[in-house]
Image (cartoon, grey):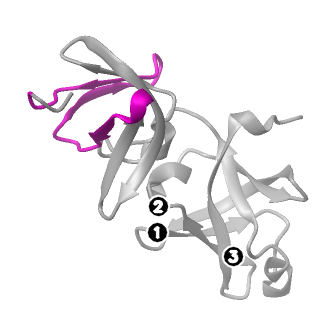
């Protein structure tokens, strides 16, 4: 099976081993929620600029930024040490959200509507401390806050918002 890079999203890096059975700690890129791996059976490590698939044997949320992962065929701490600092990617699927802003980086490319009117397309996400901003064309910045987002339609790649008057 051949995977194209554009169908994969990098969600973090393997930063250290965990225990002696080959488990590793995945440090998530800020903006991703640990629930992002809940429905994934496979992940990909970027080895020599190529995505190499690995079966996810076990996934355990450690905290808000770390996930403990056990990959198939990696059964010892020395084996796991060979994979430290590799980036881990998954197939881009419909994101799992407990809150509307979970896994916010997956919203790049989505169209944004306010009061039924198209205001632009998300071209980037900026992190300003604990606040994420949607960057639209023409460098328009919109706060990505659950109270402002009415709904997200992943099938249509659309974000419906209710923004205060004067923001747009």
Please state if 75 lies on the left or on the right of 27 as rendered.
right
Please state if 40 lies on the left or on the right of 141 as rendered.
right
Q: Quadrant of the N terminus?
A: top right
| Disc 2 to disc 3, C-alpha distance | 22 Å
What secondary structure is marked by label 2? loop
Asked if the residue at tag 3 contacts the one at tag 2, i.e. Cβ–Cβ closer than 8 Å, the answer is: no
Q: Residues within 10 Å of mark 1 (few under 14, many from 20)?
A: some
Give the quarter of the image for residue 28: bottom right
Give the quarter of the image for residue 165: top left
What secondary structure is marked by label 1? loop
Asked if residue 126 lies in the magenta stretch, the reply is no
What segment is highlighted magenta in the picture?
136-165
Q: Earlier in the sequence, mark 3 or mark 1?
A: 3
Asked if residue 141 lies in the magenta stretch, the reply is yes
Nearer to the camera, 126 or 70: 126
Q: Nearer the viewer, mark 2 or mark 3?
A: 2
Q: Say above or below: 88 vs 93.
A: below
Tell me the residue that label 3 is attached to. 23
Q: Quadrant of the C terminus?
A: top left
Asked if the residue at tag 1 contacts the one at tag 2, i.e. Cβ–Cβ closer than 8 Å, the answer is: yes
Tell me the residue that label 2 is attached to. 30
Residue sitting at x 34%, y 46%: 133
Residue sitting at x 48%, y 41%: 124
Nearer to the camera, 164 or 146: 164
């Amino acid at each position: 099976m051949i995977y194209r890079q554009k169908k994969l999203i990098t969600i973090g890096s393997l930063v250290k081993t965990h225990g002696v059975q080959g488990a590793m700690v995945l440090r998530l890129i800020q903006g991703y929620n640990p629930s992002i791996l809940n429905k994934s059976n496979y992940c990909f490590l970027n080895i020599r600029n190529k995505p190499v698939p690995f079966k996810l044997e076990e996934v355990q949320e450690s905290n808000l930024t770390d996930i403990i992962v056990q990959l198939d065929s990696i059964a010892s701490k020395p084996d796991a040490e060979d994979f430290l600092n590799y980036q881990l990617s998954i197939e881009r699927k419909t994101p799992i959200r407990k809150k509307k802003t979970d896994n916010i980086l997956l919203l790049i490319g989505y169209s944004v509507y306010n009061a039924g009117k198209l205001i632009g397309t998300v071209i980037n996400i900026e992190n300003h401390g604990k606040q994420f901003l949607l960057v639209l064309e023409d460098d328009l910045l919109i706060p990505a806050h659950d109270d402002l987002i009415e709904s997200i339609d992943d099938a249509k790649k659309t974000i419906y918002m209710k923004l205060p008057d004067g923001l747009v």
